[in-house]
Image: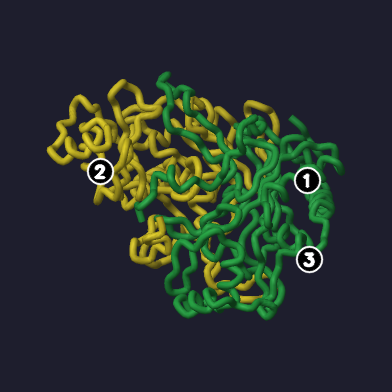
Chain colours: A yellow, B green
Amino acid sequence: MKAIPHARTKFAVIIMKSDVRIFGLEGFPLVKAGDDIVTLLLKTARTLGIPIAHGDIIVIGHKIISKSEGRVVRLSEVRPSARALKIGGRTSKDPRLVQLILGESKRIIKTGPDIVLAESKQGIVCLNAGIDKSNVEGEDTYCLLPADPDLSANRIARRIRSKTGKRVRVIVTDTYSRPFRVGQSEFAIGVSGFDPFFDYRGDRDLFGRVLKFKCVSIADELAGAAELVMGQGAEGIPVAIIKGARRIRERRCRPTPRLAIKRNVDLFQDAL
Amino acid sequence: MKAIPHARTKFAVIIMKSDVRIFGLEGFPLVKAGDDIVTLLLKTARTLGIPIAHGDIIVIGHKIISKSEGRVVRLSEVRPSARALKIGGRTSKDPRLVQLILGESKRIIKTGPDIVLAESKQGIVCLNAGIDKSNVEGEDTYCLLPADPDLSANRIARRIRSKTGKRVRVIVTDTYSRPFRVGQSEFAIGVSGFDPFFDYRGDRDLFGRVLKFKCVSIADELAGAAELVMGQGAEGIPVAIIKGARRIRERRCRPTPRLAIKRNVDLFQDAL
């Protein structure tokens, strides 16, 4: 257990064995292309008196990563293809936005009134291939997902290590609508430094019976937990630091588990 | 800000304005039919030195509620109908378990090898209508969902208020597989004392633009956050207390928002 002075409130940041604690990086500056997110992150944490420690989980809304990586596009610079014009007509979406979605998608899954559901190049099934304009400056400016969120997460983790000596885990997140449920919640779209799943299969329950199915998406739960301090509007808190989370294991030496499921093993196939 | 002595560790429980804190009720006793969960909950929290305060969010895995409400069934007492036998043959599931699922469902959505996906009587789309045997005592014993999780949540919140004078919010949760994603995570299936959604629609973003779609399922994010300390195996931590969560609003005077979406407005309809 550590007690570290808390600069702003003059109270100690005490992490007990038994609890999880989530800090929002309030006052994070606006990010633009070319900005060094890690420098901004460490500076903001220092100002707030939040120490970075080994094992901390740094959760970052993808938008500031996309912005820093220049993944921001103006519709006025986009020329819609014939296909984009056709889908635009059918969905009442701006054909230039549809063109952006097509450019970021492996496949279009569904179109409907104001709906384009796609599997993004990153393998994520979501509306508009994750392209969004909230909290992006400029009337006709849209933000794309980072081209490779795992790579972005790795790069950020490495850079935090080189600047602080601390080995942190990083999650890149986005906010998605979910089938069967009302409202949106936050999901992990990129992970660095730990296994995004905690697999109970083969473990035993309270009564000694072997668990056959349970495999928890810790990464998605951490993403949702982080959103509790981050918010979606004008809060301006794009980063959270989670301390005290258990069941965090080094990523094992096997093919990288994918957060998005393969179609042929999705239990919900044909269910909607 | 409050500093309250922490009985076991002799450190203070300090809740800062800027962070969310999640405590797991370790050492919670095993629950059986007729047990008073609130008494057990308050006793465990007291032993751990975790104070109950106004606005705390008490997250409870549904299983201890189901057990206390006697929603536990032995397969040996179930007689499968002709339909259950037929589905049992098709899915290789025990026809008596299928019978239980049929009895707890509004409709069966999909059957396949070892898969029965149903809309439960509570309106939740999930595998086996939420019927499960992990952490349930007895070789052929299964646990059903609480008959009315909102009612259970309300009853627990009222009883905590009458015993402590504190107005808490309660979430009842279960663990579900999700379409498009690998692994399971925790979802809210019953809520008391607050609006499960934080609706940004009509609010403005960082650059003053009106948000048109964002409506966050705070209840589901709190459920997932709680699971980070609860676990799914032999941890024996069925309750979490979340302190410091923001965007928690009294439930507004309008028809109770349902956590499960209506089929005709599910954007993902026909998408799987």
Q: Nearer the viewer, residue B220 or B12?
A: B220
Q: Nearer the viewer, residue A161 or B212?
A: B212
**Could you say which quadrant of the image residue A242 lies in?**
top right
Q: Are marks 1 and 3 in contact (CB under 8 Å)?
A: no
Report the label total: 3
Q: Are the residues under badges 3 and 2 in a single subunit? A: no
Residue A68 visible? The answer is: no
Which part of the image, by quadrant, shows the C terminus of chain A?
bottom left
Give me the chain letter of mark 1. Answer: B
Of badges 1 and 3, the one in the foreground is: 3
Residue B119 lies, with reference to residue A76, above or below; the image says: below
**Could you say which quadrant of the image residue A35 lies in?**
top left
Residue drawn 46% across the image and 61% down it: B109
Which residue is label 1 attached to? Answer: B50
Q: Residues within 10 Å of mark 2 (few under 14, many from 20)?
A: many
Residue B246 lies, with reference to residue B26, above or below; the image says: above
Q: Residue furthest top?
A: B208
Residue drawn 77% across the image and 40% down it: B12
Q: Residues within 10 Å of mark 3 (few under 14, many from 20)?
A: some
Q: Of marks 1 and 3, which one's residue comes earlier in the chain? A: 3
Q: Residues within 10 Å of mark 1 (few under 14, many from 20)?
A: many
Which residue is label 3 attached to? Answer: B32
Q: Position of residue A233 (x, y in %)?
A: 48, 28
For label 1, the SS is loop
Q: Position of residue B19 (x, y in %)?
A: 62, 36
Give me the chain letter of mark 2. Answer: A
Q: CA distance from mark 3 to mark 2?
A: 52 Å
The type of residue carrying mark 3 is Lys
Which residue is label 2 attached to? Answer: A104
Q: Position of residue B216 (x, y in %)?
A: 51, 37
